[in-house]
Amino acid sequence: MRVLNYLEFSSQLERSGIGTATDQQRAALATTDVEVVTSPWPEPSVSGAAELLRGDGVFRDYDVAHCNLIGPGSVAVARHAKRNDIPLVLHSHVTREDFAESFRGSTAVAPFLGKYLRWFYSQADVVLCPSKYTKGILESYPVDAPIRPISNGVDAEALAGFEDLRDEYREKYDLDGMVVFAVGNVFERKGLTTFCNVATETAHDFAWFGPYDTGPHASKTVKHWVNNPPKNVTFTGWIDDIRGAFGAGDVYLFPTKNENQGIAVLEAMACGKAVVVRDIPVFEEFYTHGHDCLKCETDEEFRRAIELLDRDPDLRRRLGENAKETAAEHDLARVGDRLVETYEDALDGSLDD
């Protein structure tokens, strides 16, 4: 079986969760017998995408088309697939709900995005999404296609050796003691204000490892916090080796307001870190309060959770050990098997929710 696993604008999305999820799909498929091509045309280019939209381009041969984004290149692939009876798999990494509070103006645009997503995803023979929660969101639009949840998974092998980077990254960013940290793009949706508010109420070092935008696309909230951080908060910007973040940090704090799954949470768990998350519906699906994480709702609850983990290192260790077991349930071999099952069902015409 030859499958197109396509992510348009891949170079621009290298630092994003969508880019990581796509990389992990390809790593998962590498454990199977599926042959993967990553571009629908021989020489990827911007002009090539325009030609494809006009129907003038030349496509590669593949048995199944699997797209990971929602832009013009993916629309072109979808049209080609429908014209040529090629099973079309569309992966929902974007919803109107998780687009809000990401960039300047994104909340205002989100309702219009929802209408587009309903149209785009409804073209698919099957829509994949990272969680049952996201499936429910898509059904509410409603998307007129079968929808299957498949975990984004976690690439534990890629994180191997994170412990060896602890001293280097703590020294580089002047971190000491029990370090509270987050990983990923700095957005208000991911709980930026709560992260900073909690930091101001504690004496611990806080570090957010990940890129942030201070240009025209950045929200006012992001600009405010990264330009005026609390004295114990460090925004590192992009780091070359993400393992350094998991080596330097001790407690993973993720007060996100909306997620389709949250790959970085699984990465922190795979590294055996104690995790504190906001009590939102998607995390009910994967994690258990008091077993592999602590769940909170208010800034005060987050502060108390951090102080509890500081006073009780045994609890911190136990949560981390259980979290590592939870992460193992999302290993890439399982993801690969689920993807292959979906492709085979698409080819056989036996798709359902």
Image (spheres, helix red, strand yellow):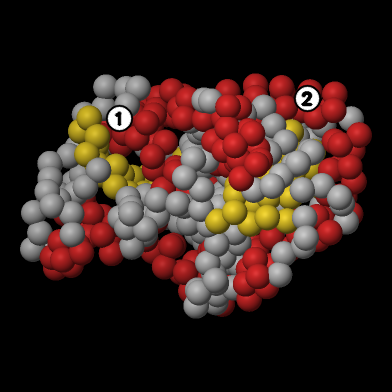
Mark 2 closeness class: few <14, some 14–19, many ≥20 residues within 10 Å: some
Residue carrying label 2: 317
Residue drawn at (27%, 22%) of the image: 33
Q: Residue 195 occupies which quadrant of the picture?
A: bottom right
Residue drawn at (79%, 38%) of the image: 177
**Upstream in sequence: badge 1 or badge 2:** 2
Q: Is 50 placed above or below 15 here?
A: below
The image quadrant where one finds the N terminus is: top left
Residue drawn at (54%, 36%) of the image: 243
Where does residue 351 sit, x and y in percent of width and height?
37, 37
Residue drawn at (53%, 25%) of the image: 161
Instruction: Kindly identify which numbered label has been placed on residue 13.
Output: none
Where does residue 139 sit, x and y in percent of width and height?
53, 54
Where does residue 203 sit, x and y in percent of width and height?
86, 50
**Secondary structure under badge 2?**
helix
Residue toward you, 185 or 106: 185
Residue carrying label 1: 344
Say what amino acid the circle numbered 2 marks.
Arg
Q: Residue 163 occupies which quadrant of the picture?
A: top right
* Left or right for 14, reference 4: right
* Left or right for 44, reference 129: left
Say what amino acid the circle numbered 1 marks.
Glu
Distance between the alpha carbons at the discs numbered 1 and 2: 42 Å
